[in-house]
Amino acid sequence: MELYDLFPWFGAFLLGAVIGSFLNVLILRLPQGQSVVYPSSHCPRCKQPLKWWHNIPILSWLLLRGRCFYCKEPISIQYPLIELATGLLFLLVIAKEGPTIKGLLIALVFTLLLALSLIDLRFKAVPDSLNLLALTLAILAQEDWLRALHDALVLAGAFALLRFYVSYYVSKKEALMIERQIRRAPWLADYYPKFPMVEAMGEGDIMVAGTMGAILGIKLSIVAIFLAALLALPASLLQRLLKEDRELPFIPFLLAGFLLAYLFGQQILAAIGLQ
């Protein structure tokens, strides 16, 4: 391979890293209702505006040794890691799809889902603006966008139905637990809801399922969801062992399953005899 043959791949990584730099702004500001445009990038401690060379993806963090140029406050390693991750996402997608509009749109979809995953982990929130944009780009990325829309609706509908079933089961389980508590201590009745309702999945998960359907199709999307559940299982078990009383965000696992199914879907289908 000649040196100039590497330019498209270097360009894909560089574009992804630049977008990753902006992604850091979205992740921190969007959930807090702040503008992603104004004010310009600045140190959160000393408020000094950053110069252009402070914002070079990955390199600036290394050159500044992970500290603010002005006040020497440590800069989170999240910044270069997100830039590196988005660069690699673009590189992987462009390597699979080629330097095409479709490849660019799919790379942007994965980038938006990465932002959603980190926002979900940090803020326990899923901005509809990013989720709907990812779903729209996923549909537009396909030549047969009507087929993509059909598959997106099927997956979103299936996930919504699954949400109702699982939520009903969990709610009934919670109601039985409350009944047992009240039988042991009747005075607690006033402190428990009469009809407990536990949401087992978020609405954001439904839109992510639709995004997967648009890009992967129905068969591979089922594989992606299975992989996501498989990856989430150890984390869920660890959370129970540590007795942490908090919800486990599912979108990061959906993204991981989605990416694995996108990159290795045909090999997975062949291995399980569904190709």
Image (cartoon, helix red, strand yellow):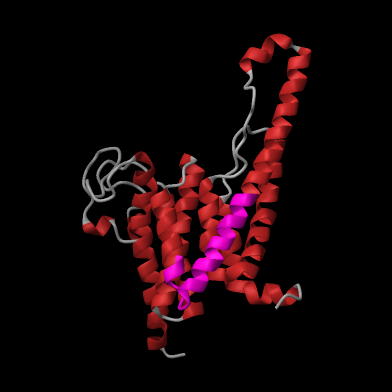
Image x and y of residue 158, in percent: 62, 56
Q: Is residue 201 above or below residue 17?
A: above
Which residues lie in the magenta part?
138-161
Question: How many numbered marks appear?
Answer: 0
Hey, which residue is sitting farthest top in the picture? Answer: 187
Side of 81 relative to 266 (left or right) = left
Q: In this view, does 58 lie above or below 106?
A: above
Q: Which residue is drawn at 41% across and 80% down?
A: 99
Hey, which residue is sitting farthest bottom in the picture? Answer: 2
* 92 magenta-colored: no
> Magenta region's main secondary structure?
helix
Viewer-proximal residue among 84 and 70? 84
* 158 magenta-colored: yes
Instruction: Tell me the quarter of the image containing the C terminus.
Output: bottom right
Image x and y of residue 124, in percent: 49, 40
Q: Which residue is drawn at 58% across and 70% down?
A: 217
Image x and y of residue 125, in percent: 47, 42
Q: Can residue 267 be seen in this view?
A: yes
Q: Is residue 92 visible?
A: no
Image x and y of residue 22, in percent: 33, 56
Q: Residue at x 39, y 67 (%)?
A: 16
Q: Is residue 191 above or below residue 207?
A: above
Side of 187 relative to 66 (left or right) = right
Side of 14 relative to 35 (left or right) = right
Viewer-proximal residue among 33 and 87? 33
Viewer-proximal residue among 213 and 270? 213
Q: Which residue is drawn at 40% across and 54% down?
A: 130
Residue 254, quarter of picture: bottom right
